[in-house]
């Protein structure tokens, strides 16, 4: 039984075959999916999807790419959406210094703002961190985000940083890149981090695992991530599937 804790099934790339994609995921053993909203439109679409399937949950938030769109109207609307019963987290939020689609100071302000919202709403957060490790950690500490906790999604940092993340009580989510032939740092993180602190995800349609790299990703492929973790940690696939699913249910309050 697998929990894909980070999917974007509302994406255009699933238009037309969403039903088949979800069916294939169920056949691979995926029993829970957290679909992640990253701006107002996608948060609305994501909740609509969660309304349609009992095993799909949703988050709402503003991605660092869209941070420049964070005005009062948007925050009021996101706040309302966050109260929907299937919304179990806020995000994705964070910093992306690779693409720099919004000015960095705006990204930082918007990240801080959403941590405040999460504390208000008592929801865990989903953090997107690309090439911004130090600033993400600083903000998480200064804003006391550990009071609500959450996950560093598609984790790409070092083991050194992972130790800090784990000390703050956050989960580390592992995606397709762990299966890549050129994977290095992430293998050490998976080997050394306790299984009780790991989640698994696809981030579909992105980050497709080997051997499908280059094709569209989908929730059923999260099985490949779980199998790779089992291989690295020298434990069974069943243990990885069971424990990461329990971890996800715990942090996102799903019973
Ligand atoms: Ni994502």
Image: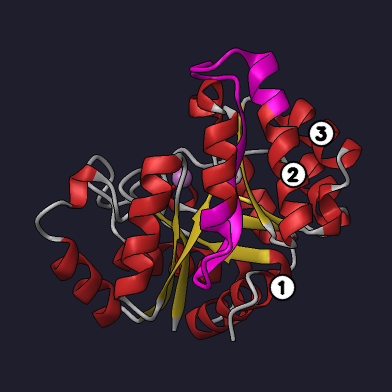
- Labels 2 and 3 touching (C-beta < 8 A): yes
**Residue in the picture at 43% in, 50% down:** 43
Q: Is residue 170 left or right of residue 243?
A: right
Q: Secondary structure at mark 1?
A: helix
The percent coordinates of residue 33 (x first, y second) are: 42, 69
The percent coordinates of residue 174 (x first, y second) are: 55, 55
Q: In the rendered view, would you say 19 is above or below 13?
A: below
Look at discs 1 and 2 and give the one toward the viewer: 2
Quadrant holding the C terminus = bottom right
Q: Which residues are magenta?
A: 80-109
Few, some or many residues within 10 Å of mark 1 (<14, 14–19, 20+): some
Quickly name the residue at label 2.
115
Mark nearer the N terminus (2 vs 3): 2
Residue nearest the observer in this picture, 39 or 251? 39
Quickly name the residue at label 1.
196
For marks 1 and 3, give the CA distance: 25 Å
Please say whether residue 181 is visible from this viewpoint: no
Quickly name the residue at label 3.
139
Residue nearest the observer in this picture, 104 or 224? 104
The percent coordinates of residue 124 (x first, y second) are: 69, 59
**Residue in the picture at 86% in, 40% down:** 143
Q: Secondary structure at mark 3?
A: helix
* Rendered image quadrant of residue 198: bottom right
């Amino acid at each position: 039984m697998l929990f894909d804790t980070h999917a974007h099934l509302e994406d255009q790339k699933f238009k037309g075959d969403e039903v088949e994609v979800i069916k294939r995921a169920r056949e691979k053993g995926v029993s829970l999916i957290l679909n992640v909203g990253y701006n107002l439109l996608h948060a609305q679409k994501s909740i609509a999807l969660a309304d349609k399937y009992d095993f799909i949950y949703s988050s709402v938030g503003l991605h660092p790419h869209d941070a420049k769109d964070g005005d009062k109207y948007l925050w009021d609307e996101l706040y309302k959406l966050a109260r929907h019963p299937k919304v179990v987290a806020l995000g994705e939020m964070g910093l992306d210094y690779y693409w720099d689609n919004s000015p960095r100071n705006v990204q930082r302000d918007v990240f801080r703002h959403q941590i405040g919202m999460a504390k208000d709403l008592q929801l865990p957060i989903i953090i997107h961190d690309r090439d911004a490790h130090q600033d993400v950690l600083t903000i998480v500490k200064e804003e006391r985000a550990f009071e609500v906790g959450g996950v560093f999604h598609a984790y790409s940092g070092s083991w050194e940083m992972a130790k800090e993340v784990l000390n703050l009580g956050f989960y580390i989510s592992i995606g397709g890149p762990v299966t890549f032939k050129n994977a290095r740092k992430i293998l050490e993180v998976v080997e050394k981090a306790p299984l009780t602190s790991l989640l698994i995800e696809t981030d579909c349609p992105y980050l497709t695992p080997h051997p499908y790299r280059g094709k569209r990703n989908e929730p059923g492929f999260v099985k490949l991530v779980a199998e790779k973790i089992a291989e690295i940690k020298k434990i069974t696939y069943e243990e990885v599937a069971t424990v990461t699913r329990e971890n996800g249910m715990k942090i996102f309050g799903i019973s």
